[in-house]
Amino acid sequence: MVQQFQQVIGSAAELRAVVGTPHAMAVDKAITEIDEHCRAFIAQSPFVLLGTSDASGRCDVSPKGDAPGFVRVLDAHTLAIPDRPGNRRADSFSNILANPHAGLLFMVPGTDETLRVEGEARIVADPELLESMAVNGHAPKLALVIDVKSAFLHCAKCIRRSELWETETWVSRDEVPSAGEMIRAAVGVETPAEEIQAGYDTSVKKLY
């Protein structure tokens, strides 16, 4: 069932009437390459969110993480993200085959600003690139290469409002549903959540 609302924004004019016009600096700060400052930010980032969509516009956001600097800056217009072992759903890759446009949000723990990058993605399997991204002797089987179209620093307000890095605001792990509980409910099996959780914990230990 789709929720019904009385006041739905349906045009750019209506939107601007509510949110106003951005400051010129907020618009002009977007650049078309990875400059020295973006490069330095990416070098310290162990975590990036990858946004993609399929041909129909259905969207997906996938987290990617590894040691700081795992996303490689190949040149001022090109980034490479190694594909580390995961659940093999390949949602992002499937989307990119249909629609190459992709968005990235880089985060650095303890830093309130984030770096937004947008471009067009390709799935590559060049051995030389993959071997250069090996960790503990394990090279990725694929890499996602982004041809950068824009990049800019996102302001700190959302991170500060969320108090994301303030450890005293963090909830106990017991207050969040476990992976075992969520998987059991989603799949609809009779297997105890604890048994599913044990299998899950074993699987996520294999990082590379």
Image (cartoon, rainbow, N blue to C red):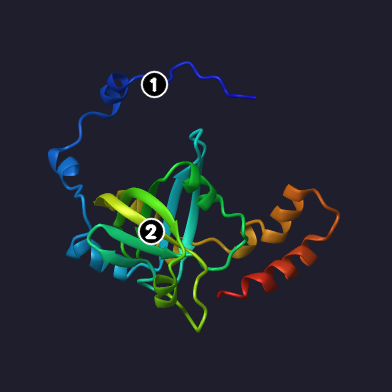
- Residue 116 visible in the displayed image: no
Marked residue nearer the N-terminal end (2 or 1) = 1
Residue position marked by numbered label 1 in the rendering: 9
State left or right for residue 39 relative to residue 51: left
Task: Indicate the position of residue 177 as horizontal and vertical percent values.
Answer: 66, 56
Q: Distance between the residues labelled 2 and 1?
A: 36 Å
In this rendered view, identify the residue nearer to me: 90 or 70. Answer: 90
Judge from the rendering whether residue 191 lies leftward or rightward of residue 19; answer left or right.
Answer: right
Assign the C terminus to one quadrant of the image: bottom right
Numbered marks: total: 2
Q: In this view, does 201 lie above or below 1?
A: below
Which of these two is toward me, 58 or 116?
Answer: 58
Disc 2 target residue: 145
In this view, the mark in front (2 or 1): 2
Residue at the image position 73 percent from the left and 56 percent from the top: 181
Label 1 neighbourhood size at 10 Å, few (<14), some (14-19), many (20+)? few
Q: Is residue 20 above or below residue 126?
A: above
Q: Which residue is drawn at 58% across and 24% down?
A: 3
The spot of residue 117 in percent (x, y) is 31, 52
| 169 with respect to 30 (left or right) | right
Q: What element carries label 1?
A: loop
Q: What residue type is labelled 2?
A: Val
| Residue 151 position within the rendered picture, expressed as x and y whole percent measured from the top left | 25, 51
- State the residue in front, 203 or 138: 138
Q: Kindly identify the residue that appears in the image at 23 percent across and 61 percent down.
A: 38
Kind of residue at disc 1: Ile
Task: Give how far across and how far down residue 135 sits, in percent.
Answer: 47, 79
* Residue 76 found in image quarter: bottom left
The answer, for residue 198, to whether it is visible in the render is yes
* Quadrant location, the N terminus: top right
Question: Looking at the image, which residue sits at the far top?
Answer: 6
For the residue labelled by badge 2, is the local secondary structure a helix, a strand or a loop? Answer: strand
